[in-house]
Image (cartoon, rainbow, N blue to C red):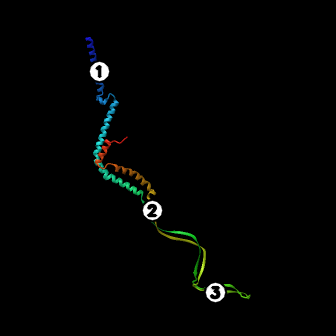
Amino acid sequence: MADDTENNQTNETGEQAETQPVETQSSDGSGLPHWLWGQKPWDAFKTFAILFSFALNLTLVIILLAVAGLIIPIVNDIVEPIVEGLNDSFVEMSEATIEQDITIDTTMPISFTLPLEQSTVVVLTEDVPLSVPARFVLPGGGGEINGQVSIVMPAGLPLPVAMSMEVPVNQTIPVQMQVPVEIPLAETELGGPFFKLRALFGPLNDMLKNLPSTNEEVGERVKQAVIEPPDG
């Protein structure tokens, strides 16, 4: 029995001695810590990628916070006023109206026939002698006498006259006038480019207005993004 006990102890000691070098070789075979290596190359790569990504993001956040104090004044004092001014100008130009008085000074040829039908009164400017045949009937069956009647219409005598005629008109007349013109700019060829510029600078202007204007506001937004992440 004593010999068997000694043999069992010897065997257990030998197994432990054989097992311990195997564990040491599997954990340190790559020269990396066991928590990083994990006995699999893919696990080691994923662990390294996570650590590298975290370090890179942390570095970028630190750099962003460091340069925010320089970028914010440039955005507030230079970029935002320029973009806002351009956007307002394009909006006003797309809604503008061209108002102008155009001077016309030219001649226009006309050719037509003017029908004239009306009654009027004319005045004789000189004596007008008239001689017309006449027939006189004697009363009581005395017969008829054919003769000639001569009269003189004096100057200044008004005479009613009915006129019916066509008057040809061929003339060149002068044309001088001021013509007011009102043209919406959006209805011209410039309307399309102005609307495209509005669509370009409008969202950019809104984005700049939504940016933080102070370092304190940057810190608050970062704090809210870290502490209170959006749902979903």
> CA gap, disc 3 to disc 1?
166 Å
Residue 110: x percent and y percent? Answer: 54, 69
Residue 78: x percent and y percent? Answer: 32, 53
Residue 102, quarter of picture: bottom left
Decide which of tag 3 and tag 1 comes sooner along the chain: 1
Residue position for label 1: 19
- Residue type beneath disc 3: Ile
Q: What element carries label 2?
A: strand
Residue position for label 2: 182
Q: In this view, does 191 lie to the left or right of 213?
A: right
> Closer to the camera, 111 or 76?
76
Decide which of tag 2 and tag 1 comes sooner along the chain: 1
Q: What element carries label 3?
A: strand
Residue at 28% across / 17% down in the picture? 12
- Residue type beneath disc 1: Thr
- Residue type beneath disc 2: Glu
Q: In this view, does 24 lie to the left or right of 122?
A: left
Quarter the N terminus occupies: top left
Instruction: Reply above or below: 127 against 109.
Output: below
Residue 142, quarter of picture: bottom right
Residue position for label 3: 151
Instruction: Reply above or below: 15 against 228.
Output: above
